[in-house]
Amino acid sequence: MEKIQKIKGFADLLADQATVFERLESAARRVFGQYGYKEARVPVLERTELFSRSIGEETDVVQKEMYTFPDRKGRSLTMRPEATAGMVRAYVENALHAQEELTKLFTYGPMFRYERPQKGRMRQFHQLDVEAFGSPSAHLDAEMLFMLGHFLTEIGIGELNFELNSLGCPDCRPAYQQALNDYFKGFDGGQLCEDCLRRKLTNPLRVLDCKVPSCKELTKGAPLISDYLCDDCRTHFATVTGVLDAAGFDYTLNPRLVRGLDYYVRTTFEVTSGKIGAQSAVAGGGRYDGLVKNLGGPDLPGVGFACGMERLALLMGDAGAAAPDFHLAVLGAQGLDAGLLLAQKLRAAGLSGECALAAKSAKAQMRQAGKSGARYCLILGESELADGTVVVKNMLAGTQETVSQDTLLDIIAP
Ligand code: HAM
């Protein structure tokens, strides 16, 4: 029979890779919990309108990247391309705003975007996502950046670049959009891509996020949002950066950072790494005051971020995999019963490890022990079986001794 293969851009996460993901999830739960965030689990499938209305009709995500299909009754559904929209929907639908003034939630799981797959870019990928609803405070933005930095340090990832910008608000952004409009007006089809010819009229901020080289080149001369911020936005951003400065938190200002989603206002940020190739953004986020109202809720502010788990895993390498305590090698078929019982005794004492289920040569067994990364290789040969002993090989130290099976635990317990 012909093999059925997985879909392009989708991956099986096996063994060590799954362990790394599990480590990321438990570190997230621990660190985010320290800041008062609680877990939420929301659906991966939502009504298409949730995403088009929140992420924005002119974004690449909505225009080109969504997995959208009609259900059996003809309603348009979409596999979530990100988590924020669903988290806002859940916040509104469950009226969480009526229960507490500030709601702090995190979630994690698969997201779906029909992008061109490459290193660090998948069509099914995973995010750790954090959202806080109900507070307009610049101090919350700063705390969120502290928490993101804390989490990344906790999982052992360093040498990252935090880029920050303010995208203004509905009061000051129209003047900036007008300035962009005026700037891009002079450029035609020879200079701007087809999408941007439309975007320069409908949503000129999106031209700044275009990946087409000729558009990128043109944006270099475009006006900067930092020159158009109103007093309130300026004060808000100065408070965020002031707190970060006071804490000695490293970041760079990037007045061209616009992010790929339309819902952002004021503080926006992206974290990049120079070690994982072209897809260098490991996390991104910002404030989205106005989105809760836009999705039918009360006029309450929000701020959040998401980390890409595949990209974090690339940076972590093998550091996430756990090694077993022992590998038990049995050299003769008659020793398998005793071997299995001995392994059970060790596991009952809390140790982890495997017992060979078929008798193989000593050489093959040592190879298997080495591959497993076990701390100890235990060997049961004919003579050990006869006198109730076991050979204990310390794989790290390279030393070896023969001990009574009764005292084995004292020697190998961590
Ligand atoms: P985003 O920047 O679109 O923001 O995605 C966040 C992170 O997800 C990226 O920095 C990247 O690490 C990862 N990511 C995105 N697309 C892919 C892909 N195709 N393959 C692998 N990793 C990918 C958001 O999604 C916002 N919802 C973040 C947010 C939360 N803003 C406020 N709250």
Image: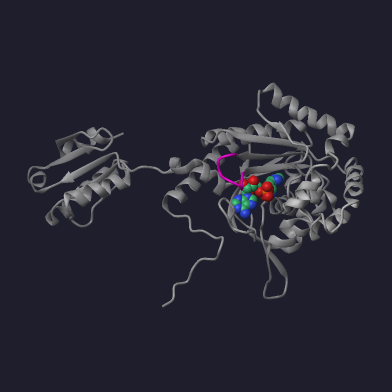
| Camera-nearest residue between 98 and 82 | 82
Q: Examine the structure image and report whether residue 278 is included in the region drawn in magenta.
A: yes
At a point 66% along the width and 52% down the height, the residue shown is 83
- Residue 406 appears at what percent x and percent y? 17, 38
Q: Quadrant of the N terminus?
A: bottom left
| Camera-nearest residue between 167 and 291 | 167
Image vertical order of residue 312 relative to residue 356, above or below:
above
Q: How many marks?
A: 0
- Residue 123 appears at what percent x and percent y? 60, 59
Magenta highlight range = 274-280
At a point 55% along the width and 64% down the height, the residue shown is 8
- In the image, farthest residue toward the bottom: 1
Residue 24 seen anywhere in this rendered image of the structure: yes
Q: Examine the structure image and report whether residue 385 is included in the region drawn in magenta.
A: no
Residue 25 seen anywhere in this rendered image of the structure: no
Q: Name the side, left or right, on which 51 lies relative to 26.
A: right
- Residue 94 appears at what percent x and percent y? 72, 52
Question: Which corner quadrant of the image does residue 246 belong to?
Answer: top right
Q: Name the side, left or right, on which 342 lies relative to 24.
A: left
Image vertical order of residue 30 relative to residue 117, above or below:
above
